[in-house]
Image (tube, rainbow, N blue to C red):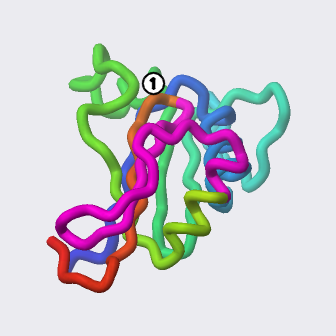
Amino acid sequence: MFKKLAPDLMVSDVGKTVTFYTEKLGFKLDMLVPENEKSVETALTKNKIYSYAMVSRDEVFVMFMQKDAYAQDLPELKGAAIGASASFYFDVDNVDELYDAFKGKGVEIIKGLSTTWYGMKEFYIKDCNGYILGFGQRNGRPHF
């Protein structure tokens, strides 16, 4: 049985990424691992370098791993670029509110709020690492 999917994104600066997701997107910080330490923290410390973090919002979890730490754990990704040729899509209940909140916080919106032919009202943003995040809400018609 599958229980959840939590993407683990390669980033250049875990602290900066956590700040973006918590302050701009409304996620909650769950945990941080300082660089070269085997300890877990629950709050960002200014000027401290982190190798890993996890944030959440409702039932969605996203993990971030610093590029060098990621390459150490998965050597196959050593030369991989940060960012992806994929987008991450969040099924939400409050797409209009999210759109207004993100826009008001200066989040880079790359595709504005619109209703698709398949019945989703959605928009897309770019996070501080170049990852594309989509947010959609069913608009009364069946979707995929």
Q: Position of residue 38 (x, y in %)?
A: 61, 42
Depth check: give the residue in front, 93 or 82: 93
Residue at position x 37%, y 29% in the image: 83
Q: Give coordinates of residue 125: x percent, y percent.
A: 47, 43
Crowdedness near tag 1: few (<14), some (14–19) or many (≥20) residues, C-alpha within 10 Å: many
Outermost residue toward the right?
46
The spot of residue 128 in percent (x, y) is: 56, 32
Callout 1, which amino acid?
A: Lys
Quadrant containing the N terminus in the rendered view: bottom left
Mark 1 lies on a secondary structure that is helix
Residue 109: say if magenta. Answer: yes
Identify which residue is drawn at 19% across, 64% down: 117
Q: Toward which corner of the image does residue 46 lie, by quadrant?
A: top right
Q: Which residue is more in the foreground, 37 or 121?
A: 121
Residue lying at 34% horizontally and 51% vertically, measured from the top left? 88
Among all residues in the image, which is located at the extreme top? 79
Question: Is 102 situated above or below 85?
Answer: below
Using residue 138 as the reference point, say whether residue 29 is left or right of it: right
Q: Residue at x 73, y 55 (%)?
A: 42
Query: Furthest residue to the bottom?
Result: 140
Residue tagged by mark 1? 67
Which image quarter: residue 27?
A: bottom right
Q: Which residues are magenta?
A: 101-128
Q: Is residue 72 visible?
A: no
Q: Position of residue 52 (x, y in %)?
A: 55, 41
* Residue 99 in sight: yes
33 relative to 130, above or below: below
Marker count (numbered): 1
Please tell me whether residue 131 is drawn above or below residue 23 in the rendered image: above
